[in-house]
Amino acid sequence: MEKLEQYFKLDFSDKQLLKTALTHSSYANENHCESNERLEFMGDAVLDVMMGKYLFEKYPKFNEGNLTKTRAKNVCESALVEYAKACELNKYLLLGKGEEKSGGRNRVALQADAFEALIGAVYMDKGITECYKIFDKIVVPIVETDGEDNFVDYKSYLQELVQSDKRTLEYRIVDEIGPSHSKTFVTRVYMDQILMGEGKGRTKKEAEQNAAEMALKKLAIRSMKF
């Protein structure tokens, strides 16, 4: 963890915040400590603000819709995973024994969540100015490369598609499989109460993305590059 601090030139006043940011719920359950889920929530909000400001300044001619769509693409799970990989965040994760054995260290959802939690921890410890040490070092270089076109945000594309046709979408969690520290969520997406797709994932976000992807395939939207 000290190496991670040095990499970003951070100096946590509360070292426990950094440890918590890297603590998966499986480890927390085994060791009776706090997981990174609350910090993930905070980091998600802070990253939205930083990305929004960055895009607002970078694209002065973008309207609200374009800014919203671009932000969604660059903070979706596949983008977060790329940010986490860029700083090898998975090396520092604290996982439960079962999660470790099952390959949890390389699961995309865990890495994405941990990146948001890291942002959240820095924000809670030092404020948003320090968060830019991570944002400028990791996020901006990736966003500014052609690789950003590979970020897939099926939910946003499906939402845009149905809104243009004045339809409504609803995502429903229909099942939760497995123990609390290692759940698989099953989500269905409905368009005007019609079932359009079902997806599974280790997080609710992942399940919703997979459901949206299935819905798009059902609608035969295959010529677009997501």
Image: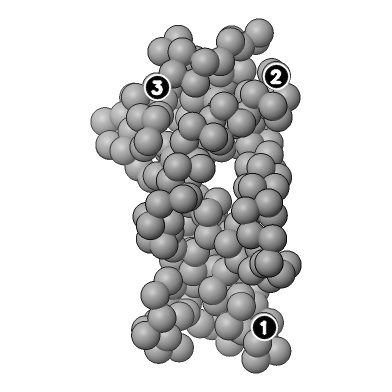
Q: Position of residue 7 (x, y in %)?
A: 44, 18
Q: Is residue 25 visible?
A: no
Of 39 and 8, the residue lying toward us: 8
Which residue is pictured at 42% across the width and 37% down the height? 84
Q: Amino acid at mark 3?
A: Tyr
Say which label, 1 or 3, has the lower sequence index: 3
Decide which of tag 1 and tag 2 comes sooner along the chain: 2
**Quarter where residue 87 is shown:** top left
In the image shown, does 140 or 187 lie closer to the viewer?
Answer: 140
Q: Which residue is mark 1?
A: 163
The answer for how far apart the CA atoms under marks 1 and 3 are is 41 Å
- Tell me which amino acid carries mark 2: Lys
Q: Is residue 101 above or below residue 179?
A: above
Quadrant holding the C terminus: bottom left
Residue type at mark 1: give it. Answer: Gln
Compared across the picture, whether 117 is left or right of 112 comes to right
Q: Nearer the viewer, residue 65 or 101?
A: 65
- In the displayed orientation, state which residue is furthest to the bottom: 165
Q: Using the image, determine if residue 94 lies above or below residue 38.
A: above
Q: Secondary structure at mark 1?
A: helix
**Of the image marks 2 and 3, the number of the one nearer the N terminus:** 3
How far apart are labels 2 and 3 at the CA level? Answer: 21 Å
Residue 135: percent from left, percent from top: 56, 35
Residue visible at 69% across and 18% down in the picture? 125
Q: Is residue 107 above or below residue 38?
A: below
**What residue is disc 3 on?**
92
Question: Circle 2 — which element?
Answer: helix
Q: Which residue is mark 2?
A: 126
Q: Specify few, some or many for label 2: CA neighbours under 10 Å numbering under 14, 14-19, or 20 or more.
A: some
User: What's the colour scheme?
Assistant: one colour
